């Protein structure tokens, strides 16, 4: 078992040398998420759906146009 652990540690030392040390960021800093064109297009596509829940707790999506036709 000690041989496996020392082999793993030597491999991580080599990887650290190649990739550099692990970055330690401040965990309290909020993540800034910037939307790109693909995400905006995806949100636009998904805005045409409403999530419904049936009596057994299953979730499914329904097109807004279909809900308006039923009303």
Image (tube, grey):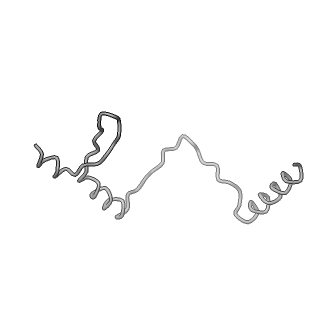
Q: Tell me what residue is drawn at x 87 percent, y 49 percent.
A: 1
* Position of residue 43 measured from the top left corner of the image (x, y, whole percent): 31, 55
Q: Quadrant of residue 55?
A: top left
Question: How many numbered dots are placed on residues in this image?
Answer: 0
Q: Tell me what residue is drawn at x 74 percent, y 60 percent.
A: 16
- Please say if 10 is above or below 61: below
* Position of residue 61 measured from the top left corner of the image (x, y, whole percent): 29, 48
* Position of residue 57 measured from the top left corner of the image (x, y, whole percent): 35, 36
Specify whether 10 is left or right of 46. Answer: right
Q: Tell me what residue is drawn at x 73 percent, y 66 percent.
A: 18
- In front: 23, or 48? 48
- In front: 46, or 22? 46
- Residue with the most extreme top position: 55
Q: Tell me what residue is drawn at x 70 percent, y 63 percent.
A: 19
* Position of residue 7 measured from the top left corner of the image (x, y, whole percent): 84, 57
- In front: 19, or 5? 5
Specify whether 17 is left or right of 32. Answer: right
Q: Quadrant of residue 51?
A: top left
- In front: 20, or 9? 9
- Please say if 30 is above or below 55: below
- Please say if 57 is above or below 50: above
- Residue with the most extreme front position: 56
- Residue with the most extreme right position: 3
* Quadrant of the rendering where the C terminus is positioned: top left
Specify whether 65 is left or right of 24. Answer: left
């Amino acid at each position: 078992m000690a041989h496996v652990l020392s082999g793993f540690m030597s491999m991580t030392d080599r990887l650290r040398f190649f990739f550099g040390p692990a970055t330690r960021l401040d965990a309290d800093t909020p993540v800034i998420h910037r939307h790109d064109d693909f995400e905006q297009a995806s949100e636009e596509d998904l805005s045409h759906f409403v999530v419904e829940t049936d009596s057994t707790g299953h979730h499914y999506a329904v097109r807004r146009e279909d809900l308006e036709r039923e009303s």
